[in-house]
Image (cartoon, grey):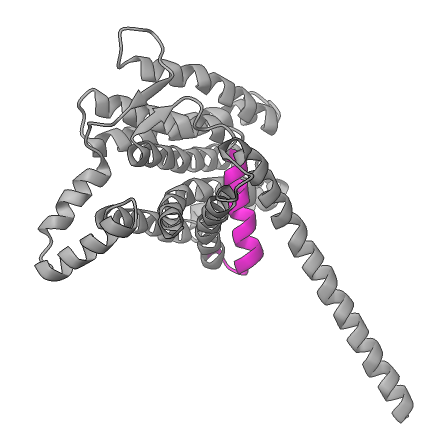
């Protein structure tokens, strides 16, 4: 059980990057972007294809982020310049990316398209950082003890865990800073009230395109990391990714609140981790198997949506009962 939970925490931290991307569109821009299901695979496919062809994993990941950014901008252009409905723009781009992803993975073979790329005997960001971990000037006995504990208890190296924590929280802090800049505030205002921003002669179309580009860049980054972590990229790995991202955002907001940007982004990160832990525990129930993954996801999202409302109504009911008691007591005293 401990091994499964630790693995879920590690994977949850990686998926938190994708959840932050979903948060940018659904909460900040108020844009229902379904491009996520395609751009996640695009990031994974781009990174996997370049690594297989012999490129440095860092370069492959950087290109994956760029490709994701371009995909998001295309969705924004369809909506703003093509005047296509926001939901339909994301669906159209998601469909287009399915074929594009097959083409990207096909660059590693003689065939034009390919549905998956294994990365079993290749370097990755994690293996590079794992090698770097061994060169750190830390007491050797402590390092061996820690590495021995991790290797004996969980399916990951110390370097992998440290790296994903550094990357995810670095992105979280950068997002916090960016959303407080003049440009970030303009994007937030565009999501809140487009008409008001246009009244100040601001080009909201550019803000929407940029916001969607940044969102899908994060999603593609997460996809590239997941591909290197799981040692495989598959064309179907992005199915339902938007639901997972929304589940992470909703769970985090329900538990930790949304009073400030800093608190909300932190809630999204922990929401992704909690989601993976709940999923891992649920899949260990005897009468559930991997085929029930989407059903479990749907149930988690439904509960995350309903429970806060139920708790809010319950608290309001208690407040009303308390006020009634106070009123009756004051009437008796009077």
In the visual, does 107 lie left or right of 147? Answer: right
Magenta-drawn stretch contains 215? no
Magenta part, dominant SS: helix
Looking at the image, is 295 positioned above or below residue 150? above
Looking at the image, is 193 positioned above or below residue 112? below
Closer to the camera, 164 or 155?
155
Closer to the camera, 70 or 63?
63
Judged from this view, the residue extending furthest toward the front is 286
> Residue 328: horizontal and vertical position, in percent?
88, 83
Residue name at image x 23 percent, y 49 percent? 151
Magenta-drawn stretch contains 255? yes
Residue name at image x 65 percent, y 56 percent? 308
How many numbered marks appear?
0
Q: Which residues are magenta?
A: 242-261
Q: Quadrant of residue 329?
A: bottom right
> Does residue 282 appear in this view?
yes
Residue name at image x 55 percent, y 23 percent? 91
């Amino acid at each position: 059980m401990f091994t499964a939970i630790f693995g879920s925490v590690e994977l949850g931290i990686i998926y938190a990057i994708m959840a932050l991307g979903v948060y940018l569109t659904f909460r900040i821009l108020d844009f229902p972007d379904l491009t996520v299901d395609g751009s996640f695979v695009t990031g994974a496919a781009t990174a996997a294809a370049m690594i297989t062809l012999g490129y440095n994993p860092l370069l492959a990941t950087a290109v994956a982020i760029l490709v994701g950014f371009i995909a998001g901008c295309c969705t924004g252009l369809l909506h703003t310049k093509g005047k296509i409905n926001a939901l339909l723009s994301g669906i159209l781009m998601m469909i287009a990316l399915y074929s594009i992803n097959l083409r990207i993975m096909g660059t590693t073979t003689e065939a034009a398209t390919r549905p998956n790329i294994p990365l079993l005997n290749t370097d990755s960001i994690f293996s590079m950082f794992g090698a770097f971990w061994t060169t750190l000037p830390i007491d050797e006995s402590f390092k061996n003890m820690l590495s021995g504990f991790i290797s004996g208890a969980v399916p990951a190296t110390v370097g992998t865990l440290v790296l994903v924590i550094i990357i995810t929280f670095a992105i979280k802090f950068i997002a916090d800073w960016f959303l407080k800049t003049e440009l970030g505030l303009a994007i937030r205002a565009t999501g809140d009230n487009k008409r008001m921003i246009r009244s100040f002669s601001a080009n909201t179309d550019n803000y929407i395109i940029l916001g969607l580009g940044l969102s899908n860049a994060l999603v593609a980054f997460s996809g590239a990391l997941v591909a290197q972590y799981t040692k495989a990229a598959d064309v179907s790995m992005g199915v339902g990714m938007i639901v997972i991202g929304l589940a992470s955002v909703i769970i985090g907001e329900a538990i930790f609140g949304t009073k400030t940007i800093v608190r909300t982004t932190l809630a999204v990160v922990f929401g992704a981790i909690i989601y993976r832990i709940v999923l891992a525990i649920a899949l260990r129930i005897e009468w559930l198997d991997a085929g029930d993954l989407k059903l479990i996801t749907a149930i988690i999202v439904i509960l995350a949506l309903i429970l806060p409302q139920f708790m809010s109504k319950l608290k309001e009911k208690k407040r009303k009962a308390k006020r009634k008691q106070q009123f009756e007591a004051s009437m008796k005293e009077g």
